[in-house]
Amino acid sequence: MRRALRHPSFLIGASLSAVIVFIALVSLVWTPHDPGQMRILSRLKPPDASFWLGTDQFGRDIASMLMVGARNALLVGLVAVGIGFTFGSVLGMLAARFEGSLLDDVVMRALDFVFAFPAVLTAILILTLFGPGLVNAVLAIGLFNIPVFARQARGATLQVMTRDFIRAARLAGCGTASILVRHVVPNILGLMIVQASTQFALAILAEAGLSYLGIGTQPPNPSWGRMLNDAQTFLARAPLLAIFPGMAIALSVLAFNLLGDGLRDIIDPRLKER
Amino acid sequence: MSAILDVVDLHHRYPLPRDGIFAQRQYVQAVEGLSFALEEGKILGIVGESGSGKSTLARLLVALETPQRGEVRFRGERISGLREARLRPFRRQIQMIFQDPFGSLDPRMRIGASIAEPLGVAEPGLDVAGRRRRIVAMLERVGLGEGAMMRYPHQFSGGQRQRIAIARALITHPKLLVADEPVSALDVSVQAQILNLLLDLKLEFGLSLVFISHDLGIVRYLSDRVIVMQHGKVVEEGESEALFSRPAAAYTKTLIAAMPRL
């Protein structure tokens, strides 16, 4: 714990992430303006006292849209990483427990197959086939998270399974399920959380990318990626329009990456014994 | 005297990683044609240098691994090659102590929970208070207090952890204990304490003991009978005193000659 408080990337990552989460939570109950309200007379306004970050081409408040966009980005990250984490961890642990069996081969080769496709490109394909929208985008991103978590879980589980305390648990009469739940999960959880934090950043980026292309979050739901796309047309007249959502994306990706890096150092398995 | 443990023509080998999916599998022969018996209440010492197959033998004896050929019998009943469910009644009677007390306790589990684990499987009917009483009594018997229950393995020294491992192994009152190099990872000053604790507990619990070690001095001090292993085979077997004073095999003589004299 003390090491965590002294670790710069953990500190910066955790505080930034906390700010983003806080903003997203606040947007549930309060935003400076209604993010969907258009004001023909106040189009493309620069930042002022009323519209902190200015308005877009429809006169909508940028600050409010960014706040609600944060909610979207976090929700996507949470659900997509949740899908990958849950299915990936279970599959990886089972593959490791039955290492070398048909189950192991089938599961890991199937996941290699998913892994072999460029994620965003295939997400575009999926969204074109099943229709654009936030739900499908989340499912597509989640699908590509499964192999990442499965590989990590399999490797970590294999390592834990060689330890004597697993043998001791078998001697105690514990079955496979109880060994996995009571001994393997607690010992690989730290690594998995580190991975989750990094994947979270990637999921936010992927959602922004898909929305930028117009196949992620659909209007009128504000999304950072789509705001970026909208801003493109007015880049010469109102460059700030692109800068704010761009910064939001960059900062949140940076935040969760730093958090992941920091956690990785803190939960380093080489230091675990101490 | 009847035998608590019978080992008949035991063979075990490990597969090496294959070069490719069509390549022939290669194997390492770890145990080759071992046969011996352990009398009830006795201590059988097994010596041999590293790589002689001692640890593999230990895992075969407690049915953590299934031999390719041969049998391990506990009180006349075959335990090798049984499915986990059919093995369960034997589990509580056959326990093992591992060499590395840092690896044999789950770092994320409190000592109390660690010791409770085999008890929970062996005696599921025991209530929380009863279980706690048994654990505290066992911890005190191995020289640790009730306070140890809520702590984690990393808060203990190597010797203390081995005491905890012993408590965990003996909590279900097993009849056979296989100790795989139980003191070789410990400081010399602690080794004697742990060995004496093991000897005391052996008498108290009526244990039969298989004691595996590369340290001939310790094996000679503890064992009734001794088996000398090399490359997975028995080189020599005999009563402890006779074997050490009049070794027959050349390998045994080499081992004894290499012993440091104090």
Image (spheres, coloured by chain):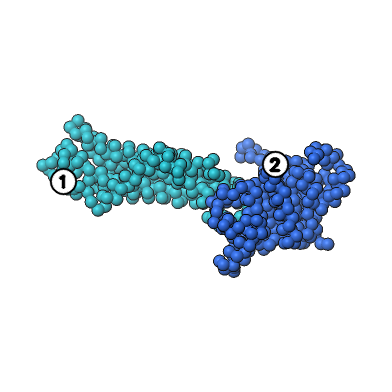
**Chain A, hue in figure:** cyan
Work out whether residue A147 can be spotted.
no
The quadrant the C terminus of chain B occupies is top right
| Residue for point 79% across, 49% down | B221
Locate residue B54, reporting x and y percent.
Answer: 73, 46
| Left or right, B135 with reference to A136 | right
Q: Residues within 10 Å of mark 1 (few under 14, many from 20)?
A: some
| Left or right, B46 with reference to A174 | right
* Chain given the colour blue: B
Locate residue A177, reporting x and y percent.
Answer: 55, 57
Disc 1 and disc 2: Cα gap in Å?
75 Å
User: Residue B48 lies in what quarter of the image?
Assistant: top right
Residue kind at label 2, given as amino acid type? Tyr
| Left or right, A105 with reference to B216 | left
| Left or right, A166 with reference to B232 | left
**In the figure, A268 relative to B93: above or below?**
above
User: Residue B235 lies in what quarter of the image?
Assistant: top right
For disc 2, the marked residue is B27
Locate residue A154, reporting x and y percent.
Answer: 53, 46
| Residue for point 42% across, 39% down | A6
**In the figure, B80 relative to A146: above or below?**
below
The quadrant the N terminus of chain B occupies is bottom right
Q: How many marks?
A: 2
| Residue for point 25% across, 35% down | A243
Q: Residue at the left extreme? A: A41
Residue kind at label 1, given as amino acid type? Met
Nearest to the observer: residue B218 or residue A27 = B218
- At mark 1, the secondary structure is loop
Query: What is the number of the mark on residue A38?
Result: 1
Work out whether residue B30 can be spotted.
yes
Locate residue B16, reporting x and y percent.
Answer: 66, 40
Nearest to the observer: residue A115 or residue B112 = B112
